[in-house]
Image (tube, helix red, strand yellow):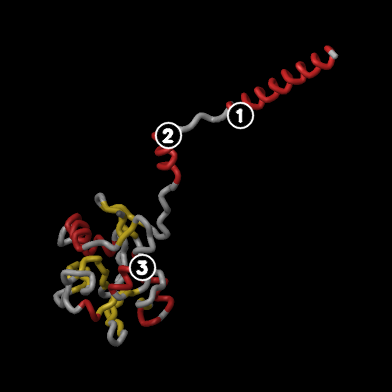
């Protein structure tokens, strides 16, 4: 009788020690991270996406170094020829330019002020030469008229869109930056907001 009692007592203590061992194993876990540590981990989670185009830094601005060539409703190749898209990029209506520029996180369509800053960096006498022949590589892909989709000015001029509205709202039309040559031979870069509702232009992006 006493042997059975002793056996059950020993079994009871053995079971308790096993449960305690299990409990102690559960206790050996990584400590809970503090909120500050969690914030640091969150900061490291998403690396900055690499731009899917060449870039160039001029002064303290980072620009795309090639014209955007992404198909979007309201865009064309110059003279509707695919090889011109490969050479110059696509040519867009302003509303289409606004939409397609949103597809590149961390980048945006530049404002008039962004362009003015770039132009002032080189100065009026040098800006055309530097932006066409320097690392910015502004190819003279011409421009187009939307109402009849006619093309003009290739190898002589180029028009780039800004995100700046010509009127007071985004329902108006955008302002262009135009590279061109006057009849007297002077090459210029100027900002234009006249009749842009009829025109198509190219896109350069600037890093936010």
Q: Nearer the viewer, mark 1 or mark 2?
A: 1
Kind of element beneath mark 3: helix
Q: In whole angstroms, how far apart are the C-alphas of marks 2 and 3? A: 37 Å
Lateral position of residue 24 relative to residue 65, left or right: right
The residue at which mark 3 appears reads as 100
Considering only vertical position in the picture, is 148 above or below 120? below
Q: Nearer the viewer, mark 3 or mark 1?
A: 1
Classed neighbour count for the residue bearing mark 2: other residues with Cα under 10 Å, few (<14), some (14–19), many (≥20):
few
Q: Quadrant of the N terminus?
A: top right
Q: Quadrant of the C terminus?
A: bottom left
The residue at which mark 1 appears reads as 26
**Location of residue 187 (image quadrant):** bottom left
Kind of element beneath mark 2: helix
Kind of element beneath mark 1: helix
In primary-sequence order, the first of circles 2 and 3 is 2
Considering only vertical position in the picture, is 58 above or below 98? above
The residue at which mark 2 appears reads as 37
In primary-sequence order, the first of circles 1 and 2 is 1
Lateral position of residue 24 relative to residue 71, left or right: right
> Considering depth in this image, is 178 or 134 the residue closer to the camera?
178
In primary-sequence order, the first of circles 3 and 1 is 1
Q: Position of residue 109 (x, y in %)?
A: 29, 63
Q: Nearer the viewer, mark 2 or mark 3?
A: 2
Q: Is residue 79 visible?
A: yes
Q: Position of residue 96 (x, y in %)?
A: 33, 73
Q: In whole angstroms, how far apart are the C-alphas of marks 3 and 1? A: 53 Å
């Amino acid at each position: 009788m006493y042997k059975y009692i002793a056996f059950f007592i020993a079994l009871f203590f053995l079971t308790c020690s096993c449960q305690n061992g299990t409990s102690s194993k559960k206790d050996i876990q990584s400590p809970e991270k503090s909120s500050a540590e969690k914030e640091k981990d969150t900061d490291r989670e998403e690396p900055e996406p690499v731009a899917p185009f060449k870039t160039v830094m001029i002064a303290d601005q980072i620009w795309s170094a090639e014209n955007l060539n992404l198909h979007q409703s309201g865009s064309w190749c110059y003279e509707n020829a695919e090889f011109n898209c490969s050479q110059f990029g696509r040519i867009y209506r302003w509303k289409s330019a606004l939409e397609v520029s949103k597809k590149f996180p961390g980048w945006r369509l530049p404002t008039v002020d962004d362009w003015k800053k770039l132009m002032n960096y080189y100065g009026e006498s040098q800006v055309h030469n530097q932006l066409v022949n320097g690392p910015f590589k502004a190819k003279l892909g011409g421009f187009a008229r939307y109402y009849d989709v006619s093309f003009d000015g290739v190898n002589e001029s180029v028009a780039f869109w800004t995100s700046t509205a010509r009127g007071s709202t985004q329902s108006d039309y955008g302002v262009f930056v135009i590279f061109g040559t006057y009849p007297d031979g002077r090459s210029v870069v100027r900002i234009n907001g006249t009749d842009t509702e009829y025109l198509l232009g190219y896109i350069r992006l600037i890093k936010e």
